[in-house]
Image (tube, rainbow, N blue to C red):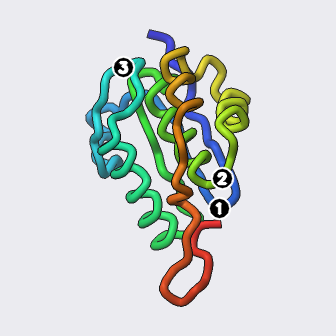
Amino acid sequence: MNRPAPVEITYESMRFLITHSPTNATLNKFTEDWPFDDGAPPPNQIVDDWLNLLKTKFCEEPGCCVAVHCVAGLGRAPVLIALALIERGMKYEDAVQFIRQKRRGAFNSKQLLYLEKYRPKLRLRFKDTDGHCCVQ
């Protein structure tokens, strides 16, 4: 299978790397494994876990890059990154276009409908205990 090359998506202080399935040699670089059906939107629990992971990573390691993978890097990984952008305050249409500029062919119609209907709770806009913005 001819897979697209990994691509970095950067928005404000958030950095992501979209890639295809890791090999046995690179699997240990990934800290979480949240499988969900190919071509489908993620279950609510995965969305919650994903956004909680991002809150933690971006606060503990400012400037870090979070790698996200799926089989080809065209559906599930871009959807998770789009959710992060939407939670950060970006409109869904802008998030889709922003990702597609770097990852042509990202998203299918079912995933686009999910993103259109998704209602953010702005979970990636928060302040730490000292009142300083942590993710901006």
Given the image, on which type of amino acid does mark 3 rest?
Answer: Asp
Q: Which picture quadrant has residue 99?
A: top right
Whole-percent x and y of residue 23?
Answer: 32, 31
Q: Secondary structure at mark 1?
A: loop
Question: In the rendered image, which residue does mark 3 sit on?
Answer: 38
Tell me the CA gap for discs 3 and 2.
Answer: 26 Å
Label 3: few (<14), some (14–19) or many (≥20) C-alpha neighbours in 10 Å: few
- From mark 1 to mark 3, how far is it between C-alphas? 29 Å
Above-or-below relation of 52 to 135: above
Residue at the spot 26% in from the left edge and 34% down from the top edge = 24
Tell me which numbered mark, 2 or 1, is placed earlier along the sequence.
1
Say what amino acid the circle numbered 2 marks: Gly
Q: Mark 1 or 3 closer to N-term?
A: 1
User: Eyeballing the image, is 113 above or below 56?
Assistant: above
Q: Residues within 10 Å of mark 2 (few under 14, many from 20)?
A: some
Q: Mark 1 is on which residue type?
A: Ser
Q: Closer to the camera, 22 or 53?
A: 53
Q: Residue at x 38, y 33 (%)?
A: 42
Of the numbered discs 3 and 2, the one sitting upstream in the chain is: 3
> Is 102 positioned to the left or the right of 32 in the image?
right
Residue that protrudes farthest toward the bottom in the picture = 130
Image coordinates of residue 17 in percent, x first then y, are 54, 42
Residue most extreme to the top = 1
Left or right: 19 with respect to 105?
left
In what element is the residue under mark 3?
Answer: loop
Circle 1 sits on which residue? 13
Q: Residue at x 65, y 36 (%)?
A: 92
Residue 67 pos. (x, y %): 46, 45
The label on residue 89 is 2
Q: Are marks 2 and 1 in contact (CB under 8 Å)?
A: no
Q: Quadrant of residue 103?
A: top right
- Against 105, residue 32 (above or below) is below
